[in-house]
Amino acid sequence: MRRVLRSSVMVMTAVAAVLVAGCGSESSIVDRYSSSGWPAMHADARNSDTSAVTGSRDLDFAWSRPLGGPVAAYASVAANGQSFVTARTENGCNLFSFQMDSGRKKWCARMNDGAVASTPIVDTATNVYVGESGAMMSFTENGQLRWRTLVVGTPLSAQFTGDGNLLFITQLGQINVLNPQTGAKVVSSFDLIPPPSIEAPNSPLIPDDRGLRECFLGTAGCPVANTPAIDLATGKFFFTFFRPGAQAAELVAMKYTGGEHPSITPEWSTDALPGGTASSPDLSKDTKKVYVTDNNGKLWAIDAETGDSLWSYDIGFNSAGSASTSDDGLIIPSGGGNGHLLAVQDKGDHAELAWERKDLLQLGVPAQSNGDTGYAVVREGANGLSLITFDTTSGETLDQDTLPGAVGFTVGTSIGPDGEVLTPSAIGELFVFK
């Protein structure tokens, strides 16, 4: 089923925009994203979870750093190798910056607990954009605050648009597009659902962190649980949305139009995914297809223009994270803690299994690099974790390295400009391999 979204467009007040040092130049999207590194949660605007860097097939553990609390989002990496990661901590910092060569902490910043839901996005000048409950913020590469803009909800990981602005959706369903130089809104906020009312009559606070804990599984308390994928050429963006009163989340397409009269308008939505979806959508290289996993163990390809289903493939388990999708349509789903490592090839009107490794229990999110090389975190022994390096054409293991002392699972895999591989554990430690 497809239907046009109904919404209310409201101008939100209380925008705090402070311009400090370190602003990048006004430029097109070609200059906003780093040409190397891992500048966004899923690497790029289409959420590909791939890197153009030729990945190493012989890694070694380099360093790790405890973060003081749980981690829920990927680490990002600037073109200069500076890495950024957020965590939920009782006291101290929530946003951390580390130097890749030594693991030395360059700086950290205290934000509120909502920061844990947001992977910092990095531009070519190494300015950093990251959300907290009730606001989007920007810092210079040295940790100086550039601006802070108030919003309704907690911004999940952002994306750059085709005209170089910053687009993000809060978990409460508010869509904002900001000028990355000043933090000012370039278009009125678009509310997918009415903003929550202030519960206490005399309270100055809005419950901007409501439902954050439900975002991991994409359940009803978190209306928008994931990172949007953007077609930079057309301004279309795609995300999951748990409509109030619905039985499951939908896949939604909307369009941002820049220029002198910028706007945000609905395109289509589909609730054809059985059980809904808990994963971020990702776009094919030609941006004609949207890939997403449902909550009944299938991978879907959706027509990006119409919202019609093109094909589905039963991967045999529920994948809680985003898939890694190469330029030629090799799709490697995340395991979600209950699935093995496998690859599916898009054949146009259907998909075929390329290979699978039922001996490997995935406990992280895979990433692909240039040179037919991939990385994933798997179970090692009874409770441990290890990073495997594998050939993406065959699934063959090329290298395996222990995450010292790690248990549970990791929340993302990122690739640095020199082929470094970063993965943070959910319990709160960043591991780096070179």
Image: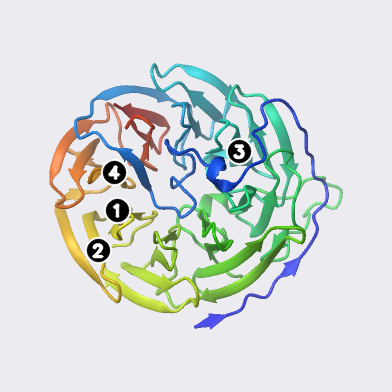
Crowd rating for badge 2 (residues with CA inside 10 Å; few <14, some 14–19, many 20+): some
- The residue at which mark 1 appears reads as 335
Q: Is residue 348 above or below residue 382?
A: below
Identity, as a three-letter code, of the amino acid under mark 2: Gln
Earlier in the chain: of badge 1 and badge 2, it is 1
Identity, as a three-letter code, of the amino acid under mark 3: Tyr
- The residue at which mark 4 appears reads as 370
Q: Position of residue 375 (x, y in %)?
A: 26, 42
> Mark 3 or 2, which is nearer the eye?
2
> Is residue 320 visible in this depiction of the protein?
yes
Badge 3 vs badge 4, beta-carbon distance below 8 Å? no
Q: Is residue 141 above or below residue 13?
A: above
Identity, as a three-letter code, of the amino acid under mark 1: Gly
Earlier in the chain: of badge 3 and badge 4, it is 3
- What is the spatial separation of the Cα atoms under label 3 and label 1, in whole angstroms? 29 Å
- What is the spatial separation of the Cα atoms under label 4 and label 2, in whole angstroms? 17 Å
Q: Is residue 111 left or right of residue 358?
A: right
Q: Quadrant of residue 358?
A: bottom left
